[in-house]
Image (cartoon, grey):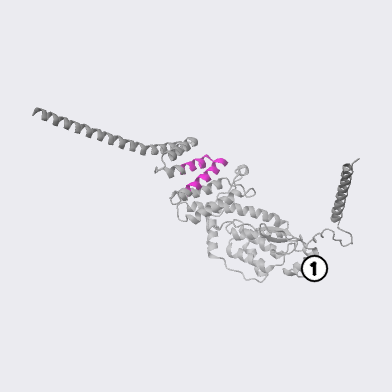
């Protein structure tokens, strides 16, 4: 009987010890799982702390360790975004370039997260921070415009949309200012063939530009002094309708009355926009800040619009404006009001197309007739005097005095000299090869 109780006690002791061991193993396993779950969180928090204290290398090292060690962690997307933020906050040409690549990778791997809108916004801001002034390289400005346009099209209803919209207006102000300066350079020198295409693209693509009213006036003036008053009236009407509070609106109305064109009523939307622009406070660089602005590499965007929808269509592939004599006239004849001009014609050609053959200067009269410039020259002037200096004759063509063109004579003389020199060298080489 006593032996039986001993065996029972031993069995109970074994069962108790086994249960304790199993509970200890389960507890250890649970603690290990909790430790693994906390490790990625600790790495992420440590990286954020380093990022806040500008320890960018240590922050990226912790984030990369988290990504490689815990590929299924809930902090994976946040870690990739934090790496991009570290490059953006570090700044500089290298840092901003790396941040753009990292933000693009985040959008590729996590396109449906809410943070993808933030990543697209940061791509535009990286290019915005590297943007040059209006008269310098515009590569970063074009990249910033494309990035903000992509944001507006993909994420039109986020809390970052107003900021992206304003940044897009500022970028387009810089791009328009660069085009305006080039066009104005040609305009004041009466080189209408070079100024007109740039002004046309400017007024159509950037209507919110701060000097868009002036650009419309310049374009109308170009057509007026080339005796295309019907086309000029179109741009005077646009100035009156779309920029009613402009200082040039009264002069544009007077021009329309002078040429008998109807004077349109101001557009209510455009009028409300310009009134709102005048009410908003605007900071402009003062006298003491102007020296600092000259040393700054970034552009001045204080004149950018604050109201209105910016252009969301991407920059199309620009056609090449080729100034060449011949057919294909796409802009009215250049020249001042006295009938003199450059004698060149603007021809739009697609990239990769071959240049058209140059035609002799005698075709100037036929081209003027085809484009509506068939009015006789004042004072008995010839067609060449009306359109500018005639194109130089082709090689070998005699001039008005019956003499050959000097350039063709020099080229022919040079070719004859080269052929005689080659002939002498050939005879000398043959003499050396003959056996003695």
Q: 390 or 243: which is nearer to us?
A: 390
Specify few, some or many for label 1: CA neighbours under 10 Å numbering under 14, 14-19, or 20 or more.
few
Left or right relative to 112: residue 258: right
Quadrant of residue 227 in the image?
bottom right
Residue ID at (11%, 30%): 4
Is residue 46 in the magenta section? no
Residue ID at (48%, 48%): 119
How many numbered dots are placed on residues in this image?
Answer: 1
Quarter holding the N terminus?
A: top left
Is residue 87 in the magenta section? yes
Decide if residue 250 is in sight here.
yes
Q: Among all residues in the image, which is located at the extreme right?
A: 436
Left or right relative to 375: residue 145: left
Q: 277 or 371: which is nearer to us?
A: 371
Q: Which residues are magenta?
A: 81-107
Q: Position of residue 51 (x, y in %)?
A: 46, 38
Q: Among all residues in the image, which is located at the extreme left?
A: 1
Q: Position of residue 356 (x, y in %)?
A: 73, 61
Decide if residue 302 is in sight here.
no
Left or right relative to 402: residue 271: left
Residue ID at (68%, 60%): 349
Q: 111 or 210: which is nearer to us?
A: 111
Quarter holding the C terminus?
A: top right
Q: Position of residue 205 (x, y in %)?
A: 59, 59
Left or right relative to 85: residue 199: right
Q: Position of residue 281 (x, y in %)?
A: 53, 52
Task: Identify residue for label 1.
Answer: 378
For numbered disc 1, what is the local secondary structure? helix
Q: Main secondary structure of the magenta part?
A: helix
């Amino acid at each position: 009987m006593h032996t039986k109780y001993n065996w029972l006690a031993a069995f109970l002791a074994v069962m108790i010890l086994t249960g304790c061991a199993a509970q200890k193993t389960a507890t250890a396993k649970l603690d290990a799982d909790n430790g693994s779950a906390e490790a990625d969180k600790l790495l992420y928090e440590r990286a954020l702390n380093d990022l806040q204290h500008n320890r960018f290398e240590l922050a990226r090292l912790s984030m990369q360790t988290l990504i490689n060690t815990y590929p299924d962690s809930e902090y994976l997307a946040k870690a990739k975004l934090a790496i991009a933020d570290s490059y953006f906050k570090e700044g500089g040409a290298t840092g901003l370039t790396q941040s753009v690549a990292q933000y693009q990778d985040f959008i590729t791997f996590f396109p449906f997260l809410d943070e993808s809108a933030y990543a697209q916004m940061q791509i535009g801001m990286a290019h915005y921070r590297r943007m040059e002034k209006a008269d310098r390289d515009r590569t970063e400005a074009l990249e910033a415009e494309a990035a903000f346009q992509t944001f507006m099209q993909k994420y039109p209803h986020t809390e970052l949309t107003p900021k992206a919209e304003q940044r897009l207006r500022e970028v387009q102000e810089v791009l328009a200012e660069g085009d305006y300066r080039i066009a104005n350079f040609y305009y004041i020198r009466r080189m209408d063939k070079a100024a007109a295409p740039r002004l046309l693209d400017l007024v159509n693509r950037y209507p919110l530009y701060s000097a868009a009213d002036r650009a419309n006036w310049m374009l109308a003036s170009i057509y007026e002094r080339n005796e295309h008053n019907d086309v000029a009236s179109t741009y005077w009407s646009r100035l009156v309708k779309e920029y009613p509070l402009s200082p040039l609106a009264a002069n544009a109305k007077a021009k329309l009355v002078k040429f008998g064109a109807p004077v349109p009523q101001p557009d209510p939307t455009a009028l409300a926009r310009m009134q709102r622009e005048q009410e908003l406070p605007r900071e402009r660089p003062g006298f003491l800040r102007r020296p600092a602005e000259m040393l700054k590499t970034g552009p001045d965007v204080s004149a950018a619009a604050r109201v209105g929808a910016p252009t969301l269509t991407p920059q199309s592939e620009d056609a090449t404006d080729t100034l060449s004599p011949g057919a294909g006239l796409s802009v009215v004849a250049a020249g001042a009001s006295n009938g003199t001009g450059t004698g060149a014609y603007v021809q739009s050609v697609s990239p990769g197309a071959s240049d058209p053959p140059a035609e002799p200067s005698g075709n100037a009269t036929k081209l003027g007739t085809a484009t509506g410039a068939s009015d006789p020259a004042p004072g008995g002037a010839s067609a060449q005097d009306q359109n500018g200096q005639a194109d130089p004759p082709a090689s070998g063509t005699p001039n008005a005095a019956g003499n050959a063109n000097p350039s063709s004579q020099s080229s022919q003389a040079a070719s004859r000299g080269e052929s005689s020199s080659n002939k002498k060298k050939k005879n000398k080489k043959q003499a050396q090869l003959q056996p003695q």
